[in-house]
Image (cartoon, rainbow, N blue to C red):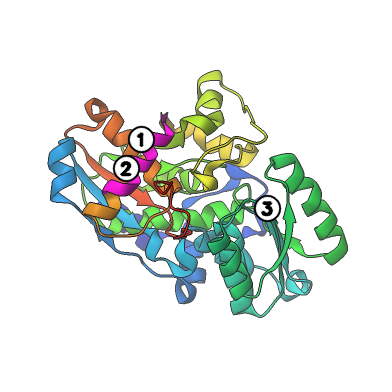
């Protein structure tokens, strides 16, 4: 591991989240405190490589496999940091959120471990596998239409009825700090990275990556990968302000939501580029990963490899950390099935 990174990790101080108001207040100390808080409840996930993919692209790819994470997705990191950071008084009515799937089941998992209720608003179109997982972890589902406006309106009703603590899927400093633990593990395990590539929807993972990498390895470039059919982050990045689509249609169901002010802070300050891939390119990358890495990943997680394959001139010769964000798929409705 890089000596400077190791010194930073060893010297870090634990600080509370009570003083954090928004993204600019977050520091590497919050990420390291999150690591300590969530350690009993999450995995330090493995990192895989593929000689075939390295030779095809002309780069060295290191896949951080959050599809092997508790609850099957990276979002358990942020969810656990938020849930186990609550005071007993704040936790008394449980937690609530709106999510297309992975945050919903991750928050249900975390709440179940703490022994508090979890109320979740999910789109009717969310994969059944994710709904089943939420219910299996004890979550209470209220369905909404598959649009940002519907999920936020229905959520307001649920929160008013339950009094539960709102844990936003990505626009929450506690969640962002938790997601930053993933890239911290990656930096400890792999020396000499030149780039990170992660999917972007609302921007929780990419923000956590920016938070960690900007402090521990600021020379590493961070690229965000997005479906072309839900490219509001790419358009936001190029326009210099948030552009929010209400109901985009893409097979990458976890990447349909727009950026918010906290995640926009990190995207606008630290991301080198937001690259897009077509639906066909995403499916091809997903199949290629299943075939070559022998792992199950969901469509949203295939977008980083899709943009790397599409932009080989940008990534050739680099050592690239690729975050595989989750593996919760409906096996009866795989995107290449007719």
**Is residue 286 inside the magenta stretch?**
yes
Taking the image as shown, residue 2 lies to the left or right of residue 282, namely: left
| Overall secondary structure of the magenta section | helix
User: Contact (CB < 8 A) between labels 3 and 1?
Assistant: no
Q: Is residue 254 left or right of residue 214?
A: right
Q: Which residue is mark 3?
A: 124
Disc with the residue nearer the chain's start (2 vs 3): 3
For marks 3 and 1, the one nearer the N-term is: 3
Query: Is residue 318 covered in magenta?
Result: no
Name the residue rendered at 43%, 58% in the picture. 181
* x and y, in percent, of residue 67 in the image: 40, 61
Q: Which residues are magenta?
A: 275-288
Alpha-carbon distance for marks 3 and 1? Answer: 26 Å
Can residue 90 be seen? Answer: yes
Q: Secondary structure at mark 2?
A: helix
**As drawn, which residue projects farthest toward the right?**
161
Kindly state the secondary structure of the residue where label 3 is placed. loop
Q: Position of residue 172 (x, y in %)?
A: 63, 51
In 3D space, how far apart are the residues under numbered discs 2 and 3 (Cα atoms)?
A: 27 Å
Residue plotted at (62% across, 27% down): 243
* Image location of residue 282, percent across then percent down: 38, 39
Local SS, label 1: helix
Mark 3 neighbour density, 10 Å: few (under 14) some (14–19) many (20 or more): some
Of the residues tagged 2 and 3, which is closer to the observer? 3
User: Do tag 2 and tag 3 residues touch (Cβ < 8 Å)?
Assistant: no
Q: Which mark is residue 285?
A: 2
Q: Give 145 or 61, whichever is nearer the viewer.
A: 145
Residue at which label 1 appears: 281
Alpha carbon of mark 1 to alpha carbon of mark 2: how far? 6 Å
Callout 2 crowding tier (Cα within 10 Å): few <14, some 14–19, many ≥20 = many
């Amino acid at each position: 591991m890089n000596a400077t990174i190791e010194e930073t990790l060893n010297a870090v101080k634990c600080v509370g989240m009570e003083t954090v108001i928004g993204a600019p207040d977050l520091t590497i100390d919050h990420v390291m405190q999150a690591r300590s808080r969530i350690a009993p409840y999450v995995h330090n996930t493995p990192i895989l490589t593929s000689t075939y993919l390295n030779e095809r692209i002309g780069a060295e790819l290191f896949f951080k496999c959050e599809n092997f994470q508790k609850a099957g997705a990276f979002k358990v990191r942020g969810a656990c940091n938020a849930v186990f950071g609550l005071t007993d008084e704040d936790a008394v009515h449980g937690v609530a959120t709106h999510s297309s799937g992975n945050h919903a089941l991750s928050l249900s998992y975390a709440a179940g471990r703490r022994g508090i209720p979890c109320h979740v608003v999910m789109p009717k179109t969310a994969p059944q596998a994710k709904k089943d997982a939420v219910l299996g972890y004890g979550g209470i589902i209220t369905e909404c239409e598959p649009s940002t406006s519907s999920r936020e309106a229905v959520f307001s009703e649920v929160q008013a009825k339950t009094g539960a603590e709102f844990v936003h899927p990505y626009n929450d400093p506690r969640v962002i700090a938790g997601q930053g633990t993933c890239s911290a593990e990656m930096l400890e395990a792999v020396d000499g990275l030149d780039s990170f590539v992660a999917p972007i929807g609302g921007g929780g993972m990419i923000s956590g990556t920016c938070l960690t990498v900007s402090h521990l390895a600021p020379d590493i470039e961070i690229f965000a990968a997005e479906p072309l059919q839900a490219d509001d982050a790419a358009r936001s990045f190029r326009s210099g302000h948030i552009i929010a689509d209400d109901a985009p249609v893409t097979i990458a169901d976890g990447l349909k939501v727009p950026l918010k002010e906290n995640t926009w802070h990190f995207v606008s300050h630290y991301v080198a580029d937001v690259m897009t891939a077509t639906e066909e390119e995403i499916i091809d990358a997903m199949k290629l990963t299943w075939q070559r890495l022998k792992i199950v990943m969901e469509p949203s997680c295939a977008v980083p490899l899709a943009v790397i394959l599409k932009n080989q001139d940008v990534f050739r010769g680099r050592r690239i950390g690729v975050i595989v964000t989750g593996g919760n798929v409906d096996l009866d409705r795989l995107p290449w099935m007719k």
